[in-house]
Image (cartoon, helix red, strand yellow):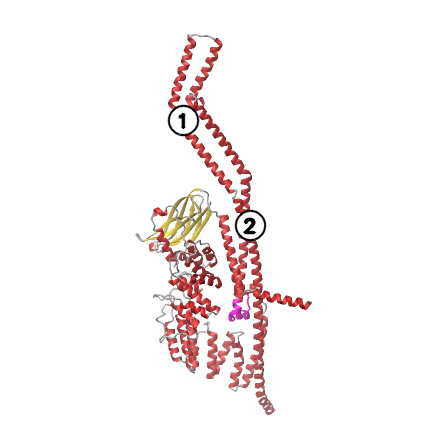
Amino acid sequence: MKVLVCIALLFASLLARADQLPVATELEQLKQQVIQLNRELFLLEEELLFPPQTQLAVFVSADAGQFFQLDSVQLLLNDTPVESHLYTAQQWDAIKRGAIQPLYKGNIKAGEHHLTAVFVGKGPDNRDYRRAVSHTFTKAEDAVLLELQINDRSSDYQPDFVVKPWSND
Amino acid sequence: MVQRLSRALLLTLLLPSSLLAASPVIPDNWHYRQAAWAFYLQQPEQALETLQLAKAQDPRTALLEAGLYLQLAMPQHAAVILQHLLNQDDVGDNALPRTLRNVALLQFARYQLELGNKALAQRYLAQVQIGADGQWLGEQQLLSQLIYWPDISLPETPPIRALAGQSEMPYIVSNQALALARAGQSDVALNWLNQLQQQLRVPEQRGFWALLFSGQWRSLRAPAGFIYPAAEKAALSDYVTLLKAQLHIDRQELADAEALLASFPLDSVLSDTALGLYSHILTEQRHIPSLLAVLQQQIKQQPFSLTAWQGATRLGEQLERQANFSDALAAYQWAEQYYQQQSSLINQQARPLQVSQLQQGLSDWQQLQLTEHNDLYRLSQDILTVEQQLAAAPVRQQRLQRLTQVVQFKLGQQQQLLSSRLPQLTGLAATLKQRYDDLRRQIADAEQQPLALSLTDGDTYQQLRRVEQAGQRFASIENALNSDNNYDNNYAQRLARLRGLLHWHYSDNSAQGRYQRRQQLAAISSALQTAEQQLAQLAAQGSSTERLKAQQQRLAQLSASQQQLNLTLLSQQQQLLAQLNQQLQQQRKAQLARLTELQRHNKQSMARMMERLLPAALTQAEVSR
């Protein structure tokens, strides 16, 4: 009887081994599960912490960035500083290559708001450069997405700073 | 590429401002560019997460996703995406541009080659169409060599100029030189290698896609951008020198080989191989003093290696060949001690590993095994990958807890809103509505009267009220006196005149008063409607309780998944660690067996030396006696 049990156990273990995936595949599946879990968490965080009814998100992007090198950005919402960022060479390089930086995400009340972004850096001829750009908007039911664009103005070889609102529809 | 996308975005921004005034819809490449931000900041997990949130998945996004999967050492997922991309039509608006299709084809062919599917790799490689700019030509040719080796195509002259600017050029040419040597044309091979060595220089900056799929994305740390590592350039040069030395040895041109190897850099990654070749040449040439120095160098530089162990015996052997038997015996005796010391060191350092030791705390022997054996290295990397995932678990747990608290708080708020505040506010709104209706009715009734006191205000109201009071008083006096004289008539006429005057005043202002009342009523009605709408919205939020409960459930599921995942990761890590330790023990046993074998051989040599020296020693003893 004992022998039969041992054979059955051996057979079961062999079957289990046959079902077992190669380690590389198993590891990939585990990594994928972690990625999915993180994504789910991110979506829930968006829904719960930054619902569209209150969400304000600000991004930074740049055109070629020939006439301006960004050192820092300060963000003021209704004249109150809410975010500031100092740029490393690597981060500025990423923006120049076309990446969009998610600068700020927060919650605001419905109604009219005033956003000011202060850009500090080096302008043409490596001169210190400080410019502010303002934007007034009305917060309603939809999320407010604003892109702070740093463009090259070829007409006078100066940088141009624009606030571009986007809709998430 | 990303810049090209940004230009495309800018083109959309150049649309008439009237079109952009009302918040244009977020562009499709928004997530792509956000993913690029994370990618450039060396956060491939986050880049992938951002990319996968994109609503529309165009081929370009899919290709970036495949590249990110490769960065995360997930080739199977990358291969699925690449194959899906390659199965799509390569014509039409949504088709992958030719250059990017080439990237996908090359990566997929490489993946098939690594799986051992050479036929499939050949099929996909054949589909690559290199454009006039020659982009990806080097990668294509190198992959072709790997797939078809050793039957690779050999041009008449080294393709150094044709592949100028391609980072793969040195590998392609050196492979061709090897193939030439195998075909017995070592003269031509040596010539090609000489030409190659002169051309070795830092290649041009690498592009986005080349970097993404080359696995050299870490070089982005350099602020200057994509830099071809100088260490690779040095290693390439050393590799070509070694190839040339090997070819000279094959041609029995030992002096030329020695000349090349004598100046070989000691700090090169290939110095072990160079020392091996050098000691071979010196043995052949019987340059015993130099050979002894090289062997000692090998023993010092390559602990726990077969080369060093063999070197220990070879020291004695070389002295024996010189008929220097007493020194040879001393060398063999030293070798015996060395073997014993190596055995005890291996036993000491080959203790079972823990995960924490993999990051820091490996013994020299363990470190060497992981460096020299691919399987062991891969296992250790897998364990560290799992460890990374496990280390991120507490952060995920904190995020989950925070979200659970938020949901609970919001549910509490909802509960309070629904159970107390909403009924209160609804009741208040209903009372106000009722009062408004009553007021409107009263006004409507008053407006039917010729001179309604309630519809007057200010002086008119006061005057009318006084006239009415005077009228009432007069009527009461008249009734009391019951008289009918001129005095009374006079008062009645005066009162009637005053009433008429006020009536005329009232009629004169009534249109304006009616208009003002209607305006005020309309304003109150509108305010009441707004309040009702807001209440309706609040009431509608009551339905978000269901949503919050669903989110709470999702959070609970995620928490359970997280725990399950942690358990699986831990179990996987333990399995991998057990496997690594088992294989390390196998290495230990195999190396000890090799050492025993060398020791046995060394002991035989020692015995042989003693046999030679013993008669001489006896003779000397007899002479001295």
Q: On screen, A42 above or below B83?
A: above
Pointer 1: residues within 10 angstroms few (<14), some, or many (20+)?
Answer: some
Q: Position of residue B109 (x, y in %)?
A: 44, 67
Q: Amino acid at mark 1?
A: Arg
For label 1, the residue is B514
Instruction: Check chain identity for marks 1 and 2: say if they share one.
Output: yes
Q: Is residue B520 magenta?
A: no
Q: Position of residue A96 (x, y in %)?
A: 38, 56
Cα–Cα span, label 1 and label 2: 59 Å
Majority secondary structure of magenta residues: helix
Q: Nearer the viewer, residue B31 or B318?
A: B31
Residue B287 seen: no
* Residue stretch rendered in magenta on the structure: B361-378
Label 2 sits on a secondary structure element that is: helix
Which quadrant of the rendered structure holds the N terminus of chain B? bottom left
Pointer 2: residues within 10 angstroms few (<14), some, or many (20+)?
Answer: few
For label 2, the residue is B553
Please tell me which of labels 1 and 2 falls first in the chain. 1
Label 2 marks a residue whose chain is B
Q: Nearer the viewer, residue B458 or B424?
A: B424
Marker disc for residue B193: none
Label 1 marks a residue whose chain is B
